[in-house]
Amino acid sequence: MKTGSPWNARAARRFEDPRIIEFKPRPRSGKNRPVPPIVDPLLQWESDEYRLRMQQNFLAITVLIIILGAGLWLFHELTMSSRTLLCVEAGQANCVPIDQRGMIK
């Protein structure tokens, strides 16, 4: 039988190695301490995201309304131009459209 260092001494030497971290249990003090409520960390991010999404939706609707208005105006102008061109090609003399107020466009 070997008479060297006992097993406990070998374990104590193992923790002297700087590469090994010894974990110690936390002290249990204040069992009646109030536990803070669990707050979802994504809740603030989701509300900010919701606000940003609503702003983007509003901007998209505004852009679509502008595009629709421009398209309707362009359609009206092209229709009037087409009617005037057909009138001129037909050889008629009075092809200028007259506004409702009696003014020439």
Image: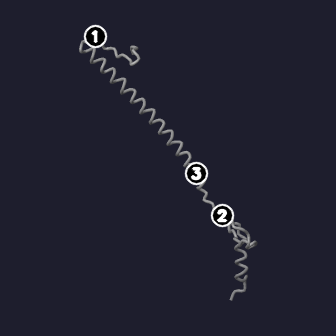
Task: Look at the picture and state if 89 lies above or below 55.
Answer: above
Q: Which residue shows up at 36% across the image and 27% down it? A: 75
Q: CA distance from mark 1 to mark 3?
A: 66 Å
Residue found 33% across the figure and 20% down from its top: 81
Q: Tell me where residue 87 sits by quadrant.
A: top left
The amino acid on which the numbered mark 3 sits, given as a three-letter code, is Ser
Q: Does residue 70 lie above or below 54 as drawn?
A: above
Q: Who comes first in sequence, dot 1 or dot 3?
A: 3
Secondary structure under the numbered disc 1 in the rendered image: loop
The disc at residue 47 is 3
Name the N-terminal-most of marks 3 and 2: 2
The amino acid type, in three-letter code, at marker 2 is Pro
Give the number of callouts.
3
Residue 93, numbered circle = 1
Give how far apart the Cα atoms at labels 2 and 1 are. 85 Å
In this view, the residue in front, 79 or 48, is 79
Residue at far left of view: 90
Q: Bin the neighbour count of mark 3 within 10 Å (Cα to Cα): few under 14, some 14-19, many 20 and up.
A: few
Q: Quadrant of residue 94?
A: top left
Residue 18 image point, x, y percent: 71, 66
Label 1 Cα crowd, 10 Å radius (few <14 / some 14-19 / many 20+): few
The colour scheme used here is: one colour
Tell me if mark 2 has few (under 14), some (14-19) or many (20+) residues whose alpha carbon lies within 10 angstroms of its own.
few
On screen, residue 92 versus residue 98, left or right, reads left
> The C terminus is located in which quarter?
top left
The residue pinned by badge 2 equals 37
- In this rendering, which labeled residue sits more in front, label 1 or label 3? 1
